[in-house]
Amino acid sequence: MTLAFQPIFSAHNLVRDLGPKNFRAVNHVSFEINAGQILCFLGPNGAGKTTTINMCSTLLAPTSGDIQVAGVDAVAQPRAARQHIGLVLGGDRGFYSRATARDNLLFFADVLGVPRKLRKERVEDALEAVALTDRADSKVQDFSRGMKQRLHIARGLLNDPALLFLDEPTNGLDPELALEVRKLVKSLAQRGTGILLTTHYLAEAQALADDLLIINEGKTAFHGTLQDLRAHSSLADHATLEDAYFALLGIETEQEGE
Ligand SMILES: Nc1ncnc2c1ncn2[C@@H]1O[C@H](COP(=O)(O)OP(=O)(O)OP(=O)(O)O)[C@@H](O)[C@H]1O
């Protein structure tokens, strides 16, 4: 018997109403992620990306809709689903700055419920995956922003997740550090991790994405490859994601003085 191909993540008809007026922040959004696939999640400020990620990572219950993570119903069994998810929010905070990178990761492995006998191995694997093994005994306060960002990703890998959610992983990094993080994201996907990544940097999404999900005002504006998006907007094969994104959202790109 041949088993039907199963994505490691699927969201179907996600809806979320927020606030006293039940503002519909996410309106029937559906997508899937396969092992080793990078899905870039794009959209203007306020489009509903964070609300969607919060639902997909079980931090927020959907108003309606279905989420499956590695075969687990994430709406009915959020704790079980969480074992398969790594969530990377990044930023300057989130670590004990006077403790070493290794001690921080050992602490978070404990918090995440990694069994005691696996913790040291998971921490060493995570440090190696983000190329921080040789700085494991340095205090986090001595880390650059790029190193802290890599440490955030290491933290997201501690439970050996099938899926990694990365929220603007290169935000505020200089071009060289951003490139380093992008290479890391690619290498994680090559190891088989499914990745959902939000970014406002369209060149970054173009460099990383296997698939694009663009939402606007809570609704799916586009889901598919960059090539599909170019075709959708009747653009040439060499058009950039930025060209195609603006065309899709009907945004005039001609600037003053042109
Ligand atoms: N508690 C709330 N009550 C009412 N509306 C809310 C609430 N939280 C968020 N919203 C609205 O829901 C919409 C979606 O917000 P969300 O944070 O998901 O957007 P986003 O795409 O992540 O934006 P950004 O790119 O700025 O991070 C926004 O219009 C926001 O104002």
Image (cartoon, rainbow, N blue to C red):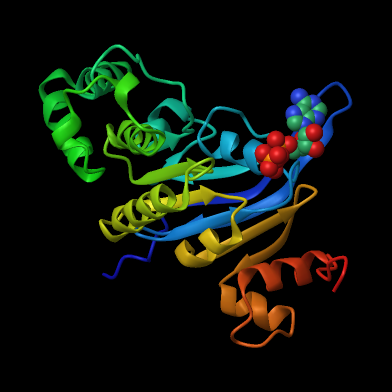
Give the quarter of the figure containing the N terminus.
bottom left
Q: How many marks?
A: 0
Give the left or right position of residue 81, taking residue 42 as reference: left
Tell me: residue 247, above or below residue 17.
below
Any part of residue 150 in sight: yes
Q: Position of residue 161 (x, y in %)?
A: 32, 40
Q: Kindly identify the residue that appears in the image at 85 percent across and 74 percent down.
A: 258
Tell me: residue 172, above or below residue 225.
above
Tell me: residue 95, above or below residue 164.
above
Quadrant hosting ligand 1: top right
Residue 99, image quadrant: top left
Q: Kindly identify the residue that appears in the image at 49 percent across and 63 percent down.
A: 209
Give the left or right position of residue 16, taking residue 186 as reference: right
The residue furthest front is: 257
Tell me: residue 30, above or below residue 3.
above
Give the left or right position of residue 104, taking residue 23 as reference: left
The residue furthest bottom is: 236
Q: Kindly identify the residue that appears in the image at 28 percent across and 32 percent down.
A: 159
Q: Position of residue 177 (x, y in %)?
A: 39, 47
Residue in the foreground of this view, choosing between 219 and 245? 245
Q: Position of residue 63 (x, y in %)?
A: 71, 33
